Amino acid sequence: MRIRFLWPGKTKVPEIRGLETIYTSRIRPLAKCEIIVTKPAKGIDEKSGARIRDIEAEGLEKHLGNDYIICLSDRGKEMTSEELARFLERRGRQSGRGLAFVVGGFLGLSDRLLARADVRLSLSRMTLSHELCRVVLMEQIYRALTIVQGRHYAK
Amino acid sequence: MRIRFLWPGKTKVPEIRGLETIYTSRIRPLAKCEIIVTKPAKGIDEKSGARIRDIEAEGLEKHLGNDYIICLSDRGKEMTSEELARFLERRGRQSGRGLAFVVGGFLGLSDRLLARADVRLSLSRMTLSHELCRVVLMEQIYRALTIVQGRHYAK
């Protein structure tokens, strides 16, 4: 299975970047895994949220190719860790397409990208910080892969 | 408002400890905030989960006093960030009792402690790592306090 995590702009908080590295190295023995940091919108007033999301969507779309796209969205579907594991297992069986997990920037993802997604996934009913969201997602993918492969979860 | 976060055993992952420090410093201008690390159970086989949870509950209970107790539990109630904000606002108005947010260790919280809690809160339908759970909770409390006080959320 090939899993890619995509988001616009390098994660700013060094501690969260450190956690991204930790989870990448935990996922790698279980699946091909890569983080792709796409071009963030810069120098645009935050009030122009839709424009920022559109610019960032363009950067993300360049990398999506034929991947099966899972966009994180607070209006998405909630799953348990077990359900996420079964989802990954089914995707692994059903096709050779890679999985692209897409997390937005501070202002979220564009409607166009959300509409294109094969699945819209919500990690919580709560609104998580977009950077924290990245590592919660990675931890969940790691956890789900340990469930699928019957491995011990490394604390 | 006085908010305390309690958990057994120091957080092992340095990056997560770093995030605890960041969120403590963000919460402090908005509410009194303290992390209390209680005694973890040590040297007991993980198969004896109930015994570990009982020992850790004893350590936690010593600090709970008259606090209003919110235990994190995956069988707890889910809230949106807005609902958490309204909850904090109501608690702030209704009583002088401090709020104690209690997060378990690797094996979770004892049934006795969960039964004693005023509220059982779930951050996600997914099972989060107990350490990551600590910072997701802190970020949510920070976010909820900015909502209550009409402040700008610092990215």
Image (tube, coloured by chain):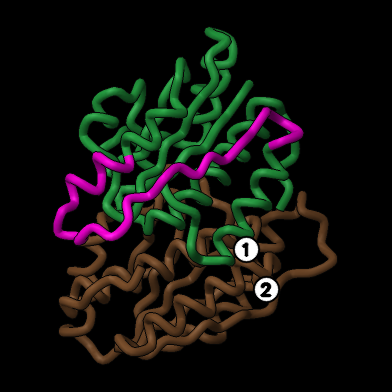
Chain colours: A brown, B green
Tell me: residue A97, above or below residue B63.
below
SS at mark 1 in the image:
loop
Residue lying farthest front?
A: B43
Magenta region, residue range: B28-56
Q: Earlier in the sequence, mark 2 or mark 1?
A: 2
Residue lying farthest top?
A: B94
Tell me: residue A109, above or below residue A29.
above
Tell me: residue A54, above or below residue B143.
below
Mark 1 belongs to which amino acid? Gly
Badge number at residue B111: none
Check the picture and name the quadrant holding the N terminus of chain B: top right
**Chain ID of residue with mark 1:** A
**Chain ID of residue with mark 2:** A
The residue depicted at 32 percent of the width and 51 percent of the height is B41
Q: Which picture quadrant has residue A116?
A: bottom left
The residue wearing badge 1 is: A105
Q: Is residue B11 magenta?
A: no
Tell me: residue A78, above or below residue A34.
above
In the image, residue A36 lies at what x, y percent? Answer: 56, 83
**Are dots 2 and 1 in contact, CB under 8 Å?**
yes
